[in-house]
Image (tube, rainbow, N blue to C red):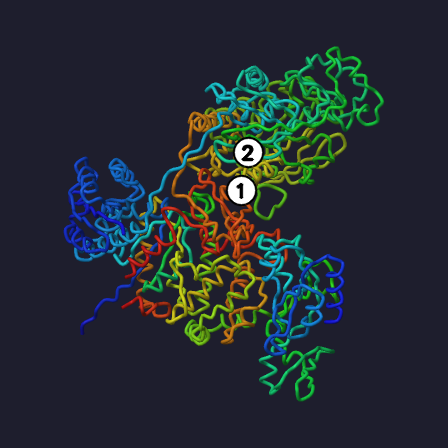
Amino acid sequence: MQVTEYKPKIVAFCCNWCSYAGADGAGSARLSYPEEVKIIRVPCSCRVNPMFILRAFQRGADGVIIAGCHPGDCHYTSGNYFTRRRMALLFSMLDYLGIERERTRVEWISAAEGAKFSKTMTEFCATVAALGENKRLEDLRCKK
Amino acid sequence: MQKMMEKRALELLADGTVSRVLGWSAGEFPYDMTPAVFETAEELQDGFVYNDFCGANLSKYLIKESRKEGKILVFLKPCDTYSFNQLLAEHRIIRDNIYVIGIECYGKADVEKLKAMGLEGITGIYMKDGEYTVETVYGSQTVKAYEAMAERCLACKSKKHVVYDELIGEDGEVVTDCNRFDMVEQLEAMTPEQRFAFWRGELSRCIRCNACRNVCPACSCEQCVFDNPNSGVAQKAAVNSFEENMFHIIRAFHVAGRCTDCGECSRVCPQNIPLHLLNRKFIKDMNAFYGEYQAGEDPDKKPPLGTYTLGDREA
Amino acid sequence: MQRIGVFICHCGTNIAGTVDVKAVAEALSHEAGVVFSTDYQYMCSESGQQLMREAIREHRLTGIVVGSCSPRMHEATFRKAAAAEGLNSYMVEIANLREHVSWIHKDMKEATEKAIILGRAAIAKVHLNAPLQAGESPVTKRALVIGGGIAGIQTALDIAEAGFEVDIVEKSPTIGGKMAQLDKTFPTLDCAACILTPKMVDAAQHEKITIYAYSELEAVKGYIGNFKAQIRRKARFVDETKCTGCGICTEKCPMKKAPNEFNMGFDKRGAVYIPFAQAVPKVATIDADYCLMLKNGKCGICSKVCGAGAIDYKQQDEIIEREYGAIVAATGFNPIDAKVYGEYGYGTCPDVVTSLELERLMNAAGPTNGTLLRPSDKEHPHTVVFVQCVGSRCTETDERGKPYCSKICCMYTAKHAMLIREKYPDTDVYVFYIDVRTPGKNFDEFYRRAVEQYGVHYIKGMVGKVTQNGKQLRVQASDLLAGEQLHINADLVVLATAIEPDKTARSIGTMLTASMDTNDFFTEAHPKLRPVESPTAGIFLSGVCQGPKDIPETVSQASACAAKVIGVLAKDKLTCNPCVASSDELLCNGCSSCEKVCPYGAITYTDKEFRGPNRTTLIRRVASVNPAVCQGCGACTVACPSGAMDLKGFTNKQIMAEVDAICK
């Protein structure tokens, strides 16, 4: 029996100061994680508009993760606190609409935590892969 | 009630306190009460109507009206005063140009419910002792108020006017046991599959007429992001299953912490989508996560998305 | 349509080893707008940059995508190269093909595919890039220091030494702060006044320093380089320019009932007073709450005896306005009110004192002329008990105290104990502690001397209760190491009360839009890397207002703070980060959502006139972002419901284009 391995599409929004640097750190230490993860650099996790997340799902992403500085370490002092509130509400709403909670995540990853970056992304990919393709939020026109 | 309001409006027009009156007039049908501005005593005497079909929240109209010459009189029900306060906090209306008369309210009728009871040719309505007397071309009929009352009124959160210059009728209290989150809780108790099916069933009926947006006092943007070709998310009618989700989620998010739960979105939806359940979910979550907050109650209080604490729950 | 050039770097074999760079360059060459696509061994090398510059010239490129190492590594390099060829630096985007692709993936096919997708995302972004210009703003070459304690004095002196004008605003009649009240200082035991007062005089005499004592900050507007501050000069009822500080008025004043704050209320001062002999400025101040002349117009003695004619009962508060390039908060601290700890008997038993009160009781210039006498009967105490951590290191459930360690108490208690044992060897000294914390140069040695040489009894344990027992105090305590209850009859109990930020700090923080933590300490821009700057540009932090500190630490932080201020003032113009937020006035509702989330106070609102339909004009409230203050986090862009607020360099459309490219 032939099994074609399903590979989810993952969009990772990483803040410039901590998590993007953490991803660089994972690279420098050659700590691999699945290539399904594609990183978009934002100045701060608080730059991530819910619209970007919904847009990613609309265009066929299977999971979206936002990574920022640990609470208290935000380069802009308070950005990640706002991220935390906004995403807590947004994710709860998505869950309310029946969209699997596991497809969305916020993680705090510092510039020194290359290992955590790699581990988090590997784990997140596996979780999303287990859920299968995102069918509840996709926009079929965009997936031709 | 209508008589008292009209009398007071005429007085205020006559003594020059206000130059215009924002109230309701009959629309195409006698139960279809429409917001209207009256500029003269004659207009007011001819057209002004107030009855238990006057559910429309007038506060949003003040964004434009309070920027015009002269002072305007507005009648606000308790729930409308929360919207008014919220608009004030957002600097959207000019308080000095508005004279607010708070009017008592014991719940407005939902004409759809009356129609479902088989009432036809409705011409008028008034409430007395917990009953609506509905006037029709075939004579009048009484129904129990709670059977014909709009859902949002059955779950009324407050009979208290949070702002007014004068009151007609009684001021009430905040309703602490309004059970307005019951339906949200029911949905939360379902499985994700059931919830998805529920919302698919509801939201797929959306025709993107934008009525919810246009009536919403919190959706008062100069231009909506969904109408702005430069926003990258401008859309017209929903042609795909996802688009209405996106629209309604983003709309609910944009009004989160600003929505006073006035219920106008669901009232005007021609497809009868329970849109208020989206807003109430946010309100319920914000209350649970960050402490009780009622938009419009206290204009000086920081909204949940405009502040944070170090120990907030993780997303 | 942009004319985009794509440059894929091999980085030796770092990228080329796992990514088929030629295939990537080839695939991206077919993307819309790409007019040139190539690969090269080392793009960051001189010849790599040359290659890029030539391509810009030859192909009239308007946008650049470099597939290379992380932008944190060489973005600046490539931006510079582009700028050298006349292309705006912000038209360069980097696809991170090394750290995010080649270094973590092993399979060439998959890595190459990912590299192409990241390249596409960068191209999609460049399509929407716009040239950005860094703005400039001028700098007023004058600094304001709020608070004239040792922190403020040191910062002011260092700034002034660098040649810049400094104003010190101090709310009390003299500068000097808490240090002026201290007796000796640890760990060297030199006298506080001997080392502080020369600095006070230096500050007073420095031609670049202006001291506004008995003055308070009223309002602050503006931003880094361009602050405008209003200072309220409270009425002293004494003309500062005429008063010679001779003190005759203070001697002759018949109203000697005012508690002397400088001596912690242990003695009385006149209604007209000079806080202490070395006060700076040395001028008298009339306390309006006690002055008979000001209260009921009967007296006027000070005016009669003043040879300089400096007394002016009609003096009014005066508000002056000054412009500054930078502002330093040096608002200092106060001990908490020990009365909240009723179990220690403070406020009810006169012989229970705080450590700061003990400083005055031991100070040669204090109410007892330096002889340690109990407040109740002026007897010499033979048993002294020190209680540590009164209000410090409290658990969350203890609302009376503070969660943090006040940091200075362990050391000053060791000092007190040592000084008492030194002067009065017949006195028994007990110290009850939770932990003894002595990090600092020569600190632990100092503490050990107290224990080993001076025979101070250190007991690990908490004091439960202090009660009056005849002429003595009964101290109930536990000795945790011995596991027993202790009862000590003491003559004097000293509470090492926690310190907290001065009460005025919160309102000053609001004025400066400088963020504060829940304990009202000012927050630093970065806890490790920018410890003397506030997140709000142009606001700097000196001394205990940022967190508990001892004198050596305060002074070094004050100097560090001065260095940062000098760094701002030395510039003629400040260059701003061009990737800042900006509001589209046509879309803005003026709702203030953005202002609430801005950590820098960069957003202000103005009423602007707009053209309405039918030749009407409408006045609307709209937000505007000060690019000199905005740091470009983007919090406002998400708070904005109308989408009026956007972030340059990371616009909504750009990020969505990246999302689209990745999800395609």
Q: Residue furthest front?
A: C615
Percent coordinates x, y for residue C133 in the rendering? 36, 39
Q: Is residue C403 left or right of residue C238?
A: left
Q: Which residue is mark 2?
A: C545
Is any atom of residue B292 visible in this view?
no
Please name whichever residue, C54 or B272, is drawn nearer the observer in this view of the structure.
Answer: C54
Percent coordinates x, y for residue C118 in the rendering? 26, 53
Is any atom of residue C49 visible in this view?
yes
Number of disc labels? 2
Label 1 marks which chain's residue?
Answer: C
Check residue C517 in the rendering and tell me which mark sits there, or answer none: 1
Question: From mark 1 to mark 2, how far is it between C-alphas?
Answer: 11 Å
Percent coordinates x, y for residue C9 in the rendering? 19, 45
Please name whichever residue, C471 or C502, is drawn nearer the observer in this view of the structure.
Answer: C502
Residue visible at 59% across and 81% down in the picture: B113
What residue type is disc 1 on? Answer: Asp
Residue visible at 31% across and 62% down in the picture: A126
> Do tags 1 and 2 sit on the same chain?
yes
Please name whichever residue, B202 or C225, is drawn nearer the observer in this view of the structure.
Answer: C225
Percent coordinates x, y for residue B31 in the rendering? 62, 78
Numbered disc 1: secondary structure: loop
- Mark 1 or mark 2: whose residue is earlier in sequence: 1
Numbered disc 2: secondary structure: helix
Q: Residue furthest bottom?
A: B138
Q: Is residue A20 left or right of residue B271?
A: left
Check residue A80 in the rendering and tell me which mark sits there, or answer none: none
Q: Is residue B89 left or right of residue C123?
A: right
Which corner quadrant holds the N terminus of chain A? bottom left
With respect to residue C580, does B29 lie above or below? below
What residue type is disc 2 on? Answer: Cys
Q: Which quadrant of the view contains residue C513?
A: top right
